[in-house]
Image: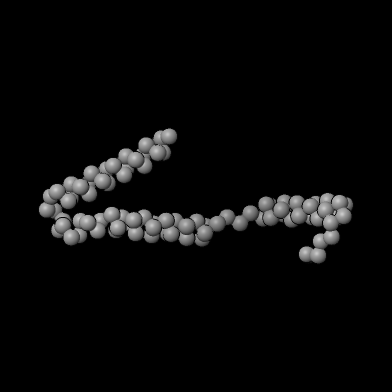
């Protein structure tokens, strides 16, 4: 619930700022209408950047890989006992 309140507060603050800029002449009127589009594009770029950074820092877990291989071998043995024929290596 707290996270939703933070997001709503941020949206309200941005909306108030945007309406304030529309009412005043600080930024030209033509540019002010484009601010939500700039915001959405910037948010998308930030999201892509965070995904890229997350992929670059993706942890390699050799212990987990060994456990996964062990689970695969156990599953193949279990399926062979049940009469399932596996053709994959």
Q: From this viewpoint, which residue is outermost toward the top?
A: 1
Q: At which x and y percent is residue 41?
A: 34, 59
Where in the figure is residue 70, as x and y percent of width and height? 76, 53
Residue 46 appears in the rendering: yes
Question: Which residue lies at the image location 20% right of the left edge and 56% below the top edge?
Answer: 32
Horizontal side of 47 relative to 89 (left or right) equals left
Q: Quadrant of residue 65?
A: bottom right
Q: Is residue 70 something one can see in this rendering?
A: no
In the rendered image, residue 19, in percent from the top left (x then y), is placed at 20, 47
Placement of the C terminus among the 4 image quadrants? bottom right
Q: How is the image coloured?
A: one colour
Locate the N terminus and report the quarter of the image it occupies.
Answer: top left
Residue at image location 38% in from the left, 60% down from the top: 45
Residue farthest left in this picture: 25
Q: How many marks?
A: 0
Residue at the image point whose x is 11% and y is 53% from the top: 25
Q: Is residue 10 above or below residue 45?
A: above
Residue 48, image quadrant = bottom left
> Image quadrant of residue 84?
bottom right
């Amino acid at each position: 619930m707290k996270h939703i309140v933070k997001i709503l507060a941020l949206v309200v603050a941005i909306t108030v700022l945007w309406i304030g800029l529309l009412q005043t002449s600080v930024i030209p009127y033509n540019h002010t209408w484009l601010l939500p589009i700039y915001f959405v594009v910037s948010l998308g770029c930030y999201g892509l950047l965070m995904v890229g950074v997350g992929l670059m820092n993706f942890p390699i877990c050799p212990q987990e890989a060994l456990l996964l291989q062990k689970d695969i071998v156990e599953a193949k043995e279990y399926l062979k006992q049940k009469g399932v024929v596996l053709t994959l290596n």
